[in-house]
Amino acid sequence: MTATISLPDTIMEWPAKYNEIPKAVFEEPGLWRLELENIFYGEEWHPIAHRAEIPNPGDYKAAFIGEMPIFAVHGDDGKIRVFHNACAHRGATLVTDSAGNKPDFECPYHRWLFSSRGDLVGCPNSQEFSPSFTKEKFGLRELRTESFSELYFVTLSDRTPDLRSYMTEAVSEPLGRILGNGHGLKLLGYQKVYYDCNWKAYVDNDGYHAPLLHLAFKLMGWQGGKGAQIITENGHMAFDAELSIPQKVDALEDSSIVQFKGDPDSKGSVIASTFPVTVCTKHMDMLNIRYAFPKGPRGVEVHYTYFARDDDSPELLAHRTRQCSNLLGPSGLISLEDAAIFTRIDMGNRSPGNAIFQKGVVDEYRLDLNVKQNDESGNLPRWEHYRKRMGFRRAAA
């Protein structure tokens, strides 16, 4: 797909300095249609579902890419497929619940019936259909799908590179650790939240803010250790950091909730964020995927999805269940302040000028992929990838 609208260059000419981002990029309503075509419907991979969310034949999960409704289904042959959530006849949506289990999918409009493999298996009065009609031509439209560690991604472009090349080893290695490194996962549950901000304000989260914004780090006496921030030219980023926690946390009546059981795939915190909007986290013993669904120029719905390993002992399973949303959920001990700051960023950027990144910037006129763990400059390659995808011109130095 290609963009069908454009904006005057004067509205969104990018500054010459790489550490400056136009504040208008958060608030210009005309950008949304371009973002849909150039990013969400373009050459990007979007995580949709982990096999643990739809483990049984007939299990399905609904989602969106941009404004386009889709759903993933576990077929009766064991294969997971992703389809457009639209009847192949007249386009009515087939799935209205966020998740469930069905042996087949029936459109309520004209009772066309589709199997869990997407085949059209029944349609009333077909003897009176057009001469060229055959059931084989009217199966559900399947999206291009690839998986990594049982996390299923889709893309709407046939020009998108294969998934592993797209993620690069720099991001796939920490993502693999978050997703269990070969261990199967089981779904614990969801928390869903709506943030009142542009989707780019939600994902513009940097390594600089964590110990400064989130007071729980200080209240609980947590100490950061060695760590790294990994970034790629196509907008992905990852963090790998050590954490040490006191034996007793006076700020909590029951500090067992923040105990680190020592899951071998983490020294404390691992984060992998894929462009444009998905964040996967293993913080201490919590395993989490945050699927994000922008709701137009303003508003983003985030589904915090929590997992355990399927070979966890009963004690570790109970620990993960307690720790997951209480630690890094929408109102978790660490992440409580995020909702407020997303909105304040979004609101403050209605003022004129540029947002100017500072920490970690060595050369304002060059993009640097070598950043430290707590630098905010790690966000700049993501912004540069966004600029290129959108086709905005950078001003001359």
Image (cartoon, grey):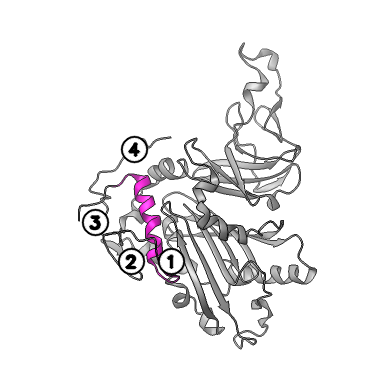
Q: Residues within 10 Å of mark 1 (few under 14, many from 20)?
A: some
**Overall secondary structure of the magenta section:** helix
Where are the magenta residues, as a range? Answer: 370-392
Q: Residue at x 37, y 55 (%)?
A: 383
Q: Position of residue 238 (x, y in %)?
A: 50, 62
Residue sitting nearer the eye, 24 or 18 = 18
Is any atom of residue 331 visible in this view? no
Of badges 4 and 2, nearer the viewer stands: 2
For disc 1, the marked residue is 206
For disc 4, the marked residue is 5
Q: Secondary structure at mark 3?
A: loop
Q: Secondary structure at mark 4?
A: loop
Question: What separation in Å lies between label 1 and label 2 (alpha carbons)?
Answer: 10 Å
Q: Amino acid at mark 1?
A: Asp
Is any atom of residue 360 visible in this view? yes
Q: Quadrant of residue 62?
A: top right
Q: Residue at x 65, y 86 (%)?
A: 247
